[in-house]
Amino acid sequence: DQQVKQNSPSLSVQEGRISILNCDYTNSMFDYFLWYKKYPAEGPTFLISISSIKDKNEDGRFTVFLNKSAKHLSLHIVPSQPGDSAVYFCAALNNAGNMLTFGGGTRLMVKP
Amino acid sequence: GAGVSQSPSNKVTEKGKDVELRCDPISGHTALYWYRQSLGQGLEFLIYFQGNSAPDKSGLPSDRFSAERTGGSVSTLTIQRTQQEDSAVYLCASSSLGGAQFFGPGTRLTVL
């Protein structure tokens, strides 16, 4: 049973437009969420995180939104750049703070 | 170095052989994690070390898998009697207490 789901395996966006990556979770005990970006043959790179006490966190072109009642979070990238093309993983931290549960990833392709 | 390092970057082995994968975490990080990513799959948690506490081994898929962390720093993941289904990228991450996890580049294991 997947506790963290990314229902879109891929997303294609034109350069300069907004990319919206979605993530749903089922465990209401998760209280900290993270987004990672992964290029081929590299480990995931931490992008941005959000605590469950917030509904938005912004860092440059990246904004994460959290809707606790819907158990849904999203990552917005604006404006999208070709270098953003990668696989994006949503992850949730358990309340013991020791284990990340990852979604299956969404491959983002930003076309020039 | 400043980041998490892993060795080897690639390992090809024959079915039935034992393999050891090494992880050097970021200096000062007390927590160390092992994950794996099989082809077409998301990231799967394997094991977690925090300081001198007993490791959380709840994600290890079988008793052929073991890991140790010597001196609270370097960790070795050992897979005994490898099987073809063990083929995956094995990722190590480290974090400070409560901090985001930073990943190494991974070791790609291929079991023939």
Image (cartoon, coloured by chain):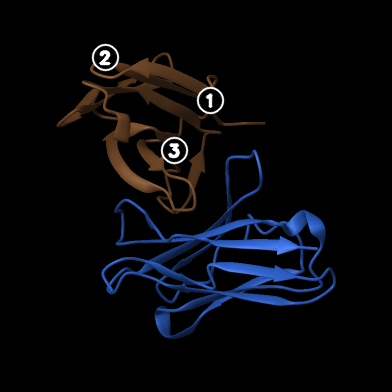
Chain colours: A brown, B blue
Q: Quadrant for the N terminus of chain B, please.
A: bottom left
Task: Say whether mark 1 and mark 3 are on the same chain.
Answer: yes
Q: In this view, which residue lies farthest toward the front?
A: A112
Q: Which residue is mark 3?
A: A91
Q: Chain of mark 1?
A: A
Q: Amino acid at mark 2?
A: Arg
Which image quarter: residue B24? bottom left
Structural crowding at the residue carrying mark 3, measured as other residues with C-alpha within 10 Å and reported as few (<14), some (14–19) or many (≥20): many
For mark 2, give the secondary structure: loop
Question: Could you tell me residue A20's position as x and y percent?
Answer: 35, 18
Q: In this view, which residue lies farthest toward the left?
A: A60
Q: Amino acid at mark 3?
A: Ala
Q: Which residue is mark 2?
A: A17
| Relative side of A4 to A110, left or right | right
| Relative side of A65 to A10, left or right | left
- Which numbered mark, 3 or 1, is in the foreground of this view? 3
Which image quarter: residue B17? bottom right
Which image quarter: residue A73? top left
Distance Cα–Cα, label 3 vs label 2: 25 Å
| Relative side of A85 to A79, left or right | right
Q: Which residue is more in the foreground, A14 or A3?
A: A14
Structural crowding at the residue carrying mark 1, measured as other residues with C-alpha within 10 Å and reported as few (<14), some (14–19) or many (≥20): some
The residue that appears at 49% across and 28% down in the rendered structure is A106
Q: In this view, which residue lies farthest toward the right?
A: B16
For mark 1, give the secondary structure: loop
Question: Could you tell me residue B106's position as x and y percent?
Answer: 50, 60
Mark linked to residue A2: none
Q: Which residue is mark 1?
A: A26
The residue that appears at 67% across and 59% down in the rendered structure is B60
